Amino acid sequence: MPIDLEQLSKDELQKLKADVDKALKTIDTRRRAEAKRAAEQAAKEFGFSLEEVLTGGGKGSKGAPKYANPADPAQTWTGRGRKPNWIIDALKSGKSLDDLTI
């Protein structure tokens, strides 16, 4: 469908440009959605969600715990972020982080 741009008025050219811009934007949106579906399918084939693959283990993955509360081994800390109260209490009582290492 060849278009003779020389025969179009300025208003027609601006309308054509707007239509082309809109079409390009919808193509990008559609292709992005197709790429996301393909990536989700590929991750699913390996038993993961796309989010798990992108974040390395799930949203907000904390990492492996390095320290455990001797009084309650279910309480753990990775060594990152704010120290839990049980760590603070243990340090105040004379224990070292080495004493709490898993």
Image (cartoon, grey):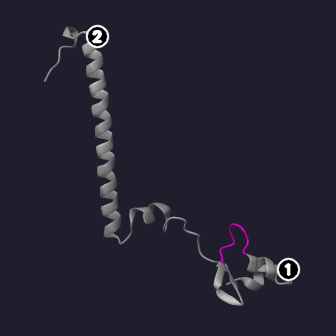
On the picture, is 21 further left or further right than 86?
A: left
Query: Which mark is drawn over residue 10?
Result: 2
Q: Which residue is found at the position 85% from the left and 84% from the top?
A: 93
**Quarter of the figure that contains the N terminus:** top left
Amino acid on which disc 1 is placed: Lys
Which image quadrant is residue 85 in? bottom right
The residue under label 1 is 92
Which image quadrant is residue 82 in? bottom right
- Above or below, 29 against 13 in this view is below
Residue 28 place in picture, x, y as percent? 32, 40
Q: Which residue is found at the position 33% from the left and 47% from the top?
A: 32
Q: Which residues are magenta?
A: 77-84
Considering only order in the chain, which callout, 2 or 1, is on the residue closer to the N terminus?
2
- Above or below, 54 against 45 in this view is above
Report the magenta stretch's main SS.
loop
Q: Which residue is found at the position 55% from the left and 68% from the top?
A: 61
Which image quadrant is residue 5 in? top left
Residue 45 place in picture, x, y as percent? 31, 69
Q: Secondary structure at mark 2?
A: helix
- Above or below, 32 against 18 in this view is below
Amino acid on which disc 2 is placed: Lys
Q: How many marks?
A: 2
Q: Is residue 82 magenta?
A: yes
- Above or below, 12 against 49 in this view is above
Q: Secondary structure at mark 1?
A: helix
**Quarter of the figure that contains the C terminus:** bottom right
On the picture, is 20 further left or further right than 88?
A: left
C-alpha distance separating marks 1 and 2: 79 Å
55 or 8, nearer to the observer: 8
Q: Is residue 9 magenta?
A: no
